[in-house]
Image (cartoon, grey):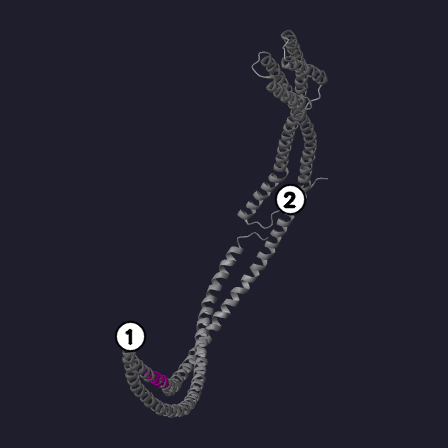
Amino acid sequence: MFKTIKQRILLGYLLVVIVSLIAAIVLTKNNANVENLVEAYVDETLPSLSAIDDIQTQSKELVLIAYSLYGTTINSREYNGQKDRLVDETNAKFSQFSYMGSDAAQEKFDVLVASAASLQQTMSATSIDWDIARENLQVITQAASELNALLTGVRSGVERAANSRTMAISAELSVSQFTIYSLIILLLAVSIMGYILAKRNIASPIEEMAKRLDDIAKTRNLQSRLPTQNLQELHAITHSVQGLLAVFHKGMTDLQHAVNDLNHSSQTLNSATSHSSTAILSFQGDIKQLVSVMDNLSDEMEQSLTLSIKAAEQAKGSAHQIAQGKVDVETTARAISDLTLNIDKTATTLDKLQSDGKNVSSVVKTIAEIADQTNLLALNAAIEAARAGESGRGFAVVADEVRTLASRTHQSTVEINAMLEKIVQSIRDSVQTMTSNKDKAHNALGLANELVITLEDGRKSVLSLVEVSNEASALVQLAKDQVQVAREGALDFQMLGDQVKAANTNVNSEAKSLFSLAENLQENVNRFKLS
């Protein structure tokens, strides 16, 4: 049992785990107890001590305000407000602890509160009885003193309980500390024991085996035997190394026989490479002549291909120029078309302007007629004013001015009609010119479209020529490629011959190296003790 390394390591780990589990259980239990004690101390003891201190302070304040009321430094209303506040706060503090003596302290506080109320009634009377007030004050002082003494006793009990809990917490912490130290010591002991056992049962046998292997490497004695080991893993290692030595022994024996065969083969190979070198030199001469003929043929085809490509490029350039001319003519045709549209629009505008001029002439004619009628009316008015004598003189002046204005208006209409006649005649001439230009523009547009068609036909003819030239170039290129392929094949044969020659040279060199290597191997094999 426990004859393997992993079993012994597992045993050590199990011991560590068991000890750790025991320590963890003990520490968990102690921590729970400490937590309960600390919780009780925090939730009960500390609030109780704080409440006792607050009650003592508030009872003293109650006595002080009683003396202040007796000394008339505060009035009854202020006293009542402060008293009620202190009583409420003190009752709230009494509810925070429930130690022995808390009920008696509550009763004493109630007596104190009742005495304070009696003092308030006495001091609030219309006629103050100072003797009763002093008695009430004495009762208050005595009740406060008794309450303070009782609370001091309760505080002592709370402190004793707190000390008891503190000691219990210290005891639990001491147990936890002892458990931790014990666990550390036990782990150290297990570690030291594991180190000693590992050194004795694992490290020392491995070091001994390494030493024996170093001796085998130095002496090259493949028949040596390794010592037997007790542990299964070390025994397996020893058995494997011993098997490896046996394999080395067999391999070196086989290598010795192979080296002898290698010496004979290298000599035969050296003789064969000498005969193949002569045949390779003759083959290389024939290949060089074939490559020279193919180079001349390839140069001639290259010149033909260059001429075909130049012709195709020139044809492409001509086609491009024709296409560019077609584009320019199309652009010109579009411009002529746009010009025709603009001429049509201008002619329409001039027609409308001519019609508007005729309308204006009609309006001016109407104005002239109105001016003639106004002149007649003014003349009649002047005649009537002359008949009226002195009383119509002012009206005669106005009639004369109106007649003068009518004459000027009639003259202006005559001038306007003359100008409109000239404008209408100019517009009529412009319309005729526009009509003539429109016809010419339409003719130019038709000619431009015919030129576009002609240029397109010419471009197609040139492109057909380009295609023929390209086909010729492709055929020449194909023939050139075939020649190039044949040349490359010949070069490949030449390269193959060079490679065969180089390989033959390398084989010859390697044969010599192989013979030298065989001799070195034979020398190295002879160093090992095989029998």
Between circles 1 and 2, the one closer to the viewer is 1
Q: How many marks?
A: 2
Q: From what the image shows, is residue 80 above or below residue 288?
A: above
Report helix, strand or loop for mark 1: helix
The answer to whether residue 279 of the structure is visible from this angle is no
Report helix, strand or loop for mark 2: helix
When asked about the image quadrant of residue 470, the answer is bottom left
Magenta stretch, residue numbers: 362-371
The answer to whether residue 72 of the structure is visible from this angle is yes
- Indicate left or right for 478 with 78 as reference: left
- Indicate left or right for 404 with 163 as reference: left
Label 1, label 2: how far apart the Cα atoms are: 164 Å
When asked about the image quadrant of residue 127, the answer is top right
Residue furthest to the top: 131
Q: Position of residue 215 (x, y in %)?
A: 55, 45
Residue kind at label 1, given as amino acid type: Ser
Q: Position of residue 246 (x, y in %)?
A: 62, 53
Q: Position of residue 288 (x, y in %)?
A: 40, 81
For disc 1, the neighbor class at 10 Å (few under 14, some 14 to 19, many from 20) is few
Mark number displayed over residue 480: none
Residue kind at label 2, given as amino acid type: Leu
Residue picked out by circle 1: 391
Q: Nearer the viewer, residue 413 or 173?
A: 413
Residue picked out by circle 2: 234
| Mark with earlier residue (1, 2) | 2
Q: Is residue 269 magenta?
A: no
Q: From what the image shows, is residue 355 above or below residue 212?
A: below
Q: Nearer the viewer, residue 303 or 516?
A: 303
Q: Nearer the viewer, residue 437 or 296?
A: 437
Determine the main secondary structure of the stretch shown in magenta: helix
Q: From what the image shows, is residue 376 above or below residue 436?
A: above
